[in-house]
Amino acid sequence: MKILVTGGAGYIGSHTCVELLQNGYEVIVVDNLCNSKEESLRRVQEITGKSLSFYKVDLLDRDHLDEVFSKHSIQAVVHFAGFKSMGESVSIPLKYFHNNVSGTLILLEVMKKYNIHNFVFSSSAGVYGDVKIVPIPEKAPLGVLNPYSRTKLMIEDILRDLYIAEQAWNIAILRYFNPVGAHPSGKIGEDPNDIPNNLTPYVAQVAIGRRPFVRVWGNDYPTPDGTGIRDYIHIMDLAAGHIKALEKLERNLGLVTYNLGTGRGYSVLEVITAFEKACQQKIPYKIMDRRPGDAAISYADPTKANLELNWYAKRTLEDMCIDTWLWQSQNPCGYP
């Protein structure tokens, strides 16, 4: 089965490519490399001993995207491509709406042209907005706190409307919580081009000496230590969820939505403490003002994915920190 992976050179995309190849899928990657590096795909092939096809293509470039579809008998698409910083999206919302939403519309239109209807969408727990009750089930009220999350919710709405209009589509919406960790080989991991927007790569860069301290955004939340609580999921568990989603779509079951999370939350300070244990050194940090658009507490109820996909998050926070540190210590400046 041939799978097109958009954003496949990125953090989640590259790890999912490993899982796809190891499970016998043929992989075609399109990525504009705006926040990723082609080296990750070379290493994916090194890890798996299998080859993939790569095209440096932006989803907004309809003509070149069409060329990729014309060259391959693609049977399903896993869609990761998009800008992903909550904080940045607050300051440049139009850029986020144009890239994330318009790019997805073009992708869906090209898929329709080639009669391809199996689609796995990389959504976010951010669509739950200001969480009132945890753990969060898929049926929880939807709402957003920042433009990045709004693009995810807008795309979800587009997919729901598309399915109502054309039930030939098979769509899996996967709402990620907070992916962390790296492949246990240490060969691939998270390597943002600029200052990391997420906690664990920032902590790792502080530990390796690339940053002076971790910025902790607020310590006055209604949580045990005052810092925000999130559901952190190992990247390899998350990647495995995409295999389960594709298997589900092969049974032609329409539109489905799943949380991919562990069902347990950890505070920012708990993550820092766990990383200190993994790297065996102190991690300096400073308390900053809250960031606009951040929820206090967010963690998943993964029961639906457990029951319907037979998918479970197996790795611990300790595993996540150990694998992150292995990646960062072996690649102190990220990919070459």
Image (tube, rainbow, N blue to C red):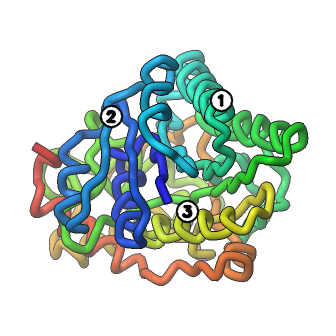
Frontmost residue, 319 versus 305: 305
Q: Earlier in the sequence, mark 1 or mark 3?
A: 1
Say if 281 sits above or below 206 in the image. below
Q: Residue at x 71, y 52 (%)?
A: 171
Q: Which residue is disc 1 drawn over? A: 113
Q: Secondary structure at mark 3?
A: strand
Q: Residue at x 56, y 26 (%)?
A: 103
The x and y percentages for residue 4 are 47, 46
* Disc 2/disc 3 C-alpha distance (Å): 35 Å
Say if 8 sits above or below 234 in the image. above
The amino acid on which the numbered mark 2 sits, given as a three-letter code, is: Tyr
Answer with left or right where residue 91 lies relative to residue 207: right
Q: Which residue is disc 3 drawn over? A: 230
Q: Secondary structure at mark 1?
A: helix
Q: Is residue 46 visible?
A: yes
Answer with left or right where residue 274 lies relative to residue 257: left
Say if 29 sits above or below 120 in the image. above
The x and y percentages for residue 237 are 46, 72
Q: Earlier in the sequence, mark 1 or mark 2?
A: 2
* Disc 1/disc 2 C-alpha distance (Å): 20 Å
Of discs 1 and 3, which sits in the foreground? 1
Q: Are marks 1 and 3 in contact (CB under 8 Å)?
A: no
Q: Residue furthest right?
A: 164
Q: Identify the disc placed on residue 55.
A: 2
Answer with left or right where residue 163 lies relative to residue 8: right
Q: Residue at x 48, y 70 (%)?
A: 240
Determine the image quadrant of residue 223. bottom right
The x and y percentages for residue 12 are 41, 54
The amino acid on which the numbered mark 1 sits, given as a three-letter code, is: Lys
